[in-house]
Amino acid sequence: MTTVILAEKPSQARAYVAAFQKSQKKSGYYEVSDPVLPNDTLVTHALGHLVELVPPEKYDAKYRNWDLANLPIFPTTYQFEVIADKQKQFQVVKTLLNRADTIIVAGDNGREGENIAWSIMKQAKIDVEHKTMQRLWINSLEKEAIIAGFRDLKDGWQFYPNYQEAQTRQISDWLVGMNASPLYTL
């Protein structure tokens, strides 16, 4: 049974790893052990947002050049992609999450932390329905707080609505930006 802890950024992952008794660095992740953790636990990380909304020209080439006749840009479905220079880490995370029986979302508390983690899982096509989803919810990266947080993990599905809220805000920001910028510029 493999457990994968998904941190939001490398510094956060390093803080978790430093709190555990043993660790071994690998390429894009760590193997860790500690009495508070299950056997076969890995810590990996995003690089902030690994997944983002695609630009308008990926929906239709006509959006390459700004033209009032093309507004508003309002896709029927929204497409996401992995940021080009973050592909390597995305592949590491994807491979580990596919291997996991349990996923611990361990990004920052709040909607954006959920958005980063769940967007990665969605883009990687992780079958989250067949995995145990947990959430680390701490306000400090001090060793004592980290260990206490791993002793008191929350049900990860409890925080899924935060992801939905954050993604809705992300899409609304995209809509405003991709329509308002050309409108006011032209």
Image (cartoon, helix red, strand yellow):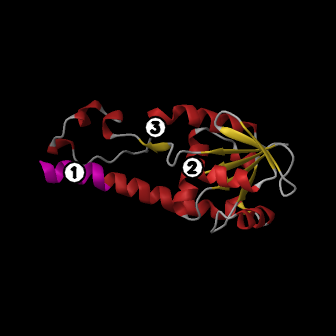
Mark nearest the camera among 1 and 2 is 2
Q: Which residues are magenta?
A: 176-186
- Is residue 166 part of the magenta span, yes or no? no
Residue type for callout 1? Ser
Badge 1 density bin: few <14, some 14–19, many ≥20, Cα 10 Å: few
Residue found 81% across the figure and 42% down from its top: 2
Task: Decide which of 75, 80 is in the foreground and name it.
Answer: 80
Q: Secondary structure at mark 1?
A: helix
List x then y, in percent, for residue 43. Answer: 71, 46
Residue found 36% across the figure and 45% down from its top: 75
Image quadrant occupied by the N terminus:
top right
Whole-Å distance between the Cαs marked 2 and 3?
Answer: 15 Å
Residue type for callout 3? Ile
Q: Is residue 48 above or below residue 89?
A: below
Per the image, the residue denoted by label 3 is: 83
Badge 3 density bin: few <14, some 14–19, many ≥20, Cα 10 Å: some
On the question of residue 118 being in view, the answer is no
Whole-Å distance between the Cαs marked 3 and 1?
Answer: 22 Å
Per the image, the residue denoted by label 2 is: 9
List x then y, in percent, for residue 34. Answer: 84, 53
Per the image, the residue denoted by label 1 is: 181
Q: Are marks 2 and 3 in contact (CB under 8 Å)?
A: no
Image mark for residue 2: none
List x then y, in percent, for residue 21. Answer: 82, 52
**How would you classify the magenta stretch by its main secondary structure?**
helix
